[in-house]
Amino acid sequence: MKKFKQFRAEQQYITEVGPFASAMMAAMGIFGAGYAGYKLFKKSKEAIKGYRETKAD
């Protein structure tokens, strides 16, 4: 019976933390994707700029 009570307590903890943890992970994922997209945009912009300068010469 003691093991069952301990198991239920752990399950309750997981149920309480679950939504908060998933929301936090989603926010981190969105931020990470935004940052990666920004870096990619900046790098491709520089590449296009370099290509135009070479073509102008």
Image (spheres, helix red, strand yellow):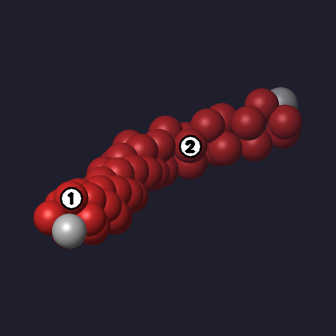
Residue 15, relative to residue 32: is it above or below? Answer: above
Residue 46 shows in this picture: yes
Compute the Cα span from label 1 to label 2: 59 Å
Q: Residue at x 75, y 42 (%)?
A: 6
Can you tell which mark lies on residue 55?
1
Please rate how many residues cluster around mark 2, counting C-alpha atoms within 10 Å: few if below 14, some from 14 to 19, many from 20. Answer: few
Q: Residue at x 56, y 43 (%)?
A: 14
Q: Are marks 1 and 2 in contact (CB under 8 Å)?
A: no
Q: Residue at x 84, y 36 (%)?
A: 3
Of the 4 image quadrants, the one containing the C terminus is bottom left
Residue 5, relative to residue 26: is it above or below? Answer: above
Examine the image and state in which quarter residue 34 appears.
bottom left
Residue 31 shows in this picture: no
Name the N-terminal-most of marks 1 and 2.
2
> Residue 32 in the image: x percent, y percent?
38, 58
Can you tell which mark lies on residue 14?
2
> Which tag is nearer the camera, tag 1 or tag 2?
1
> Residue 1 in the image: x percent, y percent?
83, 31
Q: Residue at x 77, y 31 (%)?
A: 4
Q: Find numbered disc 2 in the image and state the secondary structure of the residue it sits on.
A: helix
